[in-house]
Amino acid sequence: NAGVMQNPRHLVRRRGQEARLRCSPMKGHSHVYWYRQLPEEGLKFMVYLQKENIIDESGMPKERFSAEFPKEGPSILRIQQVVRGDSAAYFCASSLSRDLNTEAFFGQGTRLTVV
Amino acid sequence: GEDVEQSLFLSVREGDSSVINCTYTDSSSTYLYWYKQEPGAGLQLLTYIFSNMDMKQDQRLTVLLNKKDKHLSLRIADTQTGDSAIYFCAETAEANNLFFGTGTRLTVIP
C-alpha cells in the first residue's frame, strides 16, 4: 500500500504561469487535506476535501487558488497566475475518516519555486 | 484564531534527553500531536494525546500536557543522531484541521 503520493516533487514556474499540484491519497482514503509551508514557518491549513466535495476551504486564498478531488484521479491544487509569494512547500495529507483520532498521512510535498 | 508556538532550535548531545516545548491558545483543542519532518520528506506522525490525558509514553517518547497552562512537551530519551529533524506540534479542535507550530529544529551532536 503506497503512501500519499505527490507530484511533482519540485516545480518551477515563472510569474504569471499556472501551477498544478497533484496528490494521490492512500488507497481507501477519501479525505484529503492541503497544507502550505512557507519558509521558516509552520504548516498552514488550506483546504479539506472529500471525494467530489470541498468541505472546508477557509485557509485557501480567495483568488487564484482552487482545489478539486474528482471521483476518479488525484486531488489537484491549482494556482493561477503565480507570484513570488506563492513559493512554498505544499503538503497533502489523507485520512480514512474525519475522526480526530484517525491518523492523517502526509505526502513528501511539492516544492514550488516562482521565478 | 488558533496560535501554536514553539522555539525554533534545540541542540542536544547524543545520549542525552531532548525536551521540545509547545504552547497553544485554543482552549477547545481536543487532540494534540507531534510530527517529525526529516530533510526533504513529508511529516510523520510520532504520537498524539487526547486533551483529557496529561501524559502519554511510547518507548523513548513521553508527551506531557498541561491543559491549564496550554503547554505541551515532547521528551525524547537517549536521543540519537537519527532523531535530528524538525518537530512540529499541532492541535485540532472540531473541524479536523490541524494547526501547526513553526517547528523546532533538533540537532543531535555526536
Image (spheres, rainbow, N blue to C red):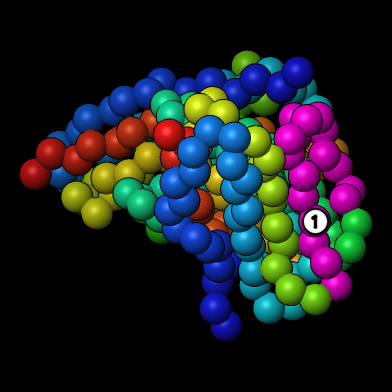
Question: Circle 1 is placed at which residue position?
Answer: A68
- What residue is drawn where x is 21% and y is 51%? B80
B40 relative to A37, above or below: below
Observer able to see residue B73: no
Instruction: From the viewer's perspective, tell me whether residue B73 is left or right of residue B104.
Output: right
What predominant SS class does the magenta segment belong to?
Answer: loop
Q: In which quarter of the view is residue A80 placed?
A: top right
Q: Is residue B60 visible?
A: yes
Q: Per the image, is A58 magenta? A: yes
In the visual, does A115 lie left or right of A73? left
Task: Please determine whether, in this image, residue B108 is positioned above or below residue A97.
Answer: above
Bounds of the magenta span?
Answer: A54-71
Residue at horizontal 44 percent and vertical 40 percent from the top: A113
Q: Residue at x 57, y 83 (%)?
A: A1
Q: Amino acid at mark 1?
A: Glu
Q: Circle 1: is it few (<14), some (14-19), or many (20+) Cα within 10 Å?
A: many
Q: Nearer the viewer, residue A109 or A68?
A: A68
